[in-house]
């Protein structure tokens, strides 16, 4: 069978498109769902940081808690993603996906407890 | 009925006798040579009439003592023995300074001789000319010797009563140092100068050759000067004891015009013995706006009301009366430095009350409300109240600020997102496990 024409044809194929296609093809729905949550958190953090820089830092505790809630949630979610990713099974032999989710949920609840205390 | 009437009259006359008492006590020690005692009868009788209790003592007498059992025995001391070089051992410059700082008032006459009192005068920033040089003036033209000078009172004076006639003076003038506690009462005439009694105009010729050096002349010299000590005691230095004498009191300035020496003596004694220009702070309070209770601590940026009640002594009735006449009083709110210095104006309509509202600085620490009102001639007013200024409590800050809504929205959306994510995750897990079972079954 002759090789597929796709890689050979240079038409409109850039590295980004390749990456995107590879991501779409090789990532499970579950991880895509996690990634969409990560993107949401990142955007939220960027908006808050821009507001802080451009408009006001005045209730500084509110900025700190709002911004750190997105950052903290991002870190926790990223940890969850790496732990439930089947490709990392060898790294996390002792951590089942259920255990990873329980860690994530507990960590997030503690995080939000602090965030709302500090929000003012 | 008649006896009742005389009874009333008796009390009226008594109250007349007592009409002008000092705010500081009525006992006066007069140190005067026995031989000169009768020279000042008008002045002394005037004091007695006002209600003062005069005790006479010669300079070398041991009794009555000035300080008994470490307590000053008299409220006021008049030292008219201006030419005495030797005093009894309890009247020394040191003991006089000690009495003054303890609140005893002094009326001291100087002379052209070098006496212990003359050396004490220089401790009060009074600079005396060399001994033996009285003040002389050849103007206005008159029959009297040049060392007997009529001096017109200043146009406006706090201490001397307005419209007082010129006073006769004979004695020594002094220059004033730059001590802020000095209160000039009467300055020498501009044409006068210090010279020995025979020298006369020769002194002027000598001084002109030296370019004016060493000449004591002009209206910058003072013949009567007050000094108010930090503790409130007052001392008046008069250049010549003759100002209070009967001779000058009766001597006419010009035909038919009485001299002002009697009024001068009364005014100077009234100021020295703390009858006139005497103020005090009755009370000070502070509280929040819309409240009446004083707090021990205030929060930064609180609006604070500070109120002071001030009275002035009225010698006519011997009472303290509310006084609203101070226009330049200031309140300071200090922590090391004054963080706030603001006018403390009188409240219109409530006599004696001064009040100001101000916002506490945005700075926490131990602060003091300070009134520090020092004006020449008047009693110094000083009051200091310590309060703490603290930052707001943890729940004292404003909440739900509109500027913070993006942050609130961010935090809430993260939490909601987490909740939805968890729900979807769990739902997906159960579906997957079903799928997984199905897969195994296949």
Image: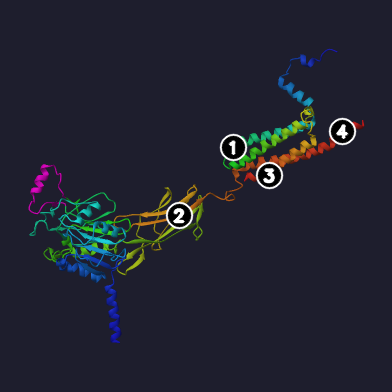
Asked whether, in this view, residue B92 is left or right of residue A67, the answer is left
Secondary structure beneath label 3: helix
The alpha-carbon separation of the residues under discs 1 and 4 comes to: 47 Å
Q: Nearer the viewer, residue B76 or B189?
A: B76
- Residue at mark 1: A52
Above or below: residue B127 compared with residue B273: above
**Mark 2 surroundings: few (<14), some (14-19) or many (≥20) residues within 10 A:** some
Between label 4 and label 2, give the one nearer the viewer.
Answer: 2
The alpha-carbon separation of the residues under discs 4 and 2 comes to: 77 Å
Sequence-wise, the earlier of marks 4 and 2 is: 2
Asked whether, in this view, residue B293 is left or right of residue B198, the answer is right
Q: Chain of mark 1?
A: A
Q: Position of residue B406 (x, y in %)?
A: 63, 40
Q: Is residue B223 visible to the viewer in this orientation of the structure?
A: no
The alpha-carbon separation of the residues under discs 3 and 4 comes to: 36 Å
Q: Nearer the viewer, residue B320 or B199?
A: B199
Q: Position of residue B37 (x, y in %)?
A: 17, 67
Q: Chain of mark 2?
A: B
Image marks 1 and 4: residues in contact by CB distance under 8 Å: no
- Residue at mark 3: A113
The alpha-carbon separation of the residues under discs 2 and 3 comes to: 42 Å
- Residue at mark 2: B386
Which region is colored magenta? B190-217
Q: Chain of mark 3?
A: A
- Residue at mark 4: B436
The alpha-carbon separation of the residues under discs 1 and 3 comes to: 23 Å
**Mark 1 surroundings: few (<14), some (14-19) or many (≥20) residues within 10 A:** many
Between label 1 and label 3, give the one nearer the viewer.
Answer: 3
């Amino acid at each position: 069978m002759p090789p597929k024409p796709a890689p050979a044809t240079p038409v409109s194929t850039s590295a980004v498109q390749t990456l995107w296609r590879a991501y779409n093809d090789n990532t499970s729905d579950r991880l895509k769902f996690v990634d969409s949550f990560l993107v949401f958190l990142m955007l939220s953090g960027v908006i808050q940081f821009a507001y802080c820089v451009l408009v006001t830092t005045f209730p500084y505790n509110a900025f700190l808690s709002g911004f750190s809630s997105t950052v903290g949630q991002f870190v926790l979610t990223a940890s969850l993603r790496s732990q439930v990713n089947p490709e990392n099974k060898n790294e996390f032999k002792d951590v089942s996906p259920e255990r990873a989710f329980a860690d994530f949920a507990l960590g997030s609840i503690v995080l939000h407890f602090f965030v709302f205390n500090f929000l003012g | 009925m008649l006896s009742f009437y005389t009874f009333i009259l008796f009390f009226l006359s008594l109250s007349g006798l007592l009409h002008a008492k000092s705010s500081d006590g009525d006992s006066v020690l007069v140190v005067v040579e026995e031989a000169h005692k009768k020279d000042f009868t008008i002045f002394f009788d005037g004091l007695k009439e006002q209600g003062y209790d005069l005790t006479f003592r010669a300079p070398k007498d041991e009794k009555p003592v000035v300080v008994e059992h470490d307590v000053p025995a008299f409220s006021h001391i008049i030292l008219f023995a201006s030419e005495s070089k030797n005093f009894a051992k309890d009247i020394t410059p040191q003991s006089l300074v000690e009495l003054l700082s303890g609140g005893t008032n002094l009326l001291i006459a100087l002379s052209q001789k070098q006496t212990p009192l003359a050396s004490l005068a220089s401790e009060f920033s009074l600079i005396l000319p060399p001994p033996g040089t009285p003040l002389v003036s050849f103007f206005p033209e008159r029959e009297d010797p040049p060392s007997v000078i009529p001096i017109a009172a200043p146009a406006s004076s706090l201490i001397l009563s307005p419209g007082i006639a010129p006073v006769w003076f004979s004695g020594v003038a002094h220059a004033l140092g730059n001590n802020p506690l000095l209160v000039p009462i009467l300055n020498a005439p501009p044409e006068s100068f210090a010279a020995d009694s025979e020298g006369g105009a020769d002194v002027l010729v000598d001084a002109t050759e030296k370019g004016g050096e060493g000449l004591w002349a002009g209206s910058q010299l003072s013949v009567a000067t007050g000094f108010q000590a930090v503790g409130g005691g007052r001392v008046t230095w008069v250049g010549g004891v003759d100002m209070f004498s009967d001779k000058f009191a009766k001597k006419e300035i010009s035909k038919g015009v009485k001299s002002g020496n009697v009024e001068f003596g009364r005014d100077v004694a009234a100021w020295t013995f703390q009858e006139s220009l005497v103020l005090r702070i009755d009370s000070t309070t502070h509280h929040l706006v819309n409240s009446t209770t004083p707090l021990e601590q205030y929060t930064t940026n609180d609006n604070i009301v500070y109120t002071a009640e001030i009275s002035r002594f009225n010698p006519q009735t011997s009472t303290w009366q509310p006084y609203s006449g101070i226009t330049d009083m200031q309140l300071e709110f200090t922590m090391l430095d004054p963080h706030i210095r603001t006018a403390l104006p009188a409240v219109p309509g409530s006599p004696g009350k001064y009040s100001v509202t101000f916002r506490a600085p945005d700075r926490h620490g131990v602060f003091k409300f300070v009134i520090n009102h020092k004006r020449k001639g008047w009693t110094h007013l000083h009051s200091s109240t310590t309060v703490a200024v603290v930052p707001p409590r943890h729940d004292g800050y404003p909440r739900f600020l509109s500027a913070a809504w993006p942050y609130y929205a961010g935090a809430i959306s993260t939490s909601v997102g987490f909740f939805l994510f968890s729900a979807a995750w769990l739902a997906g897990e159960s579906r997957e496990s079903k799928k997984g079972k199905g897969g195994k079954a296949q």
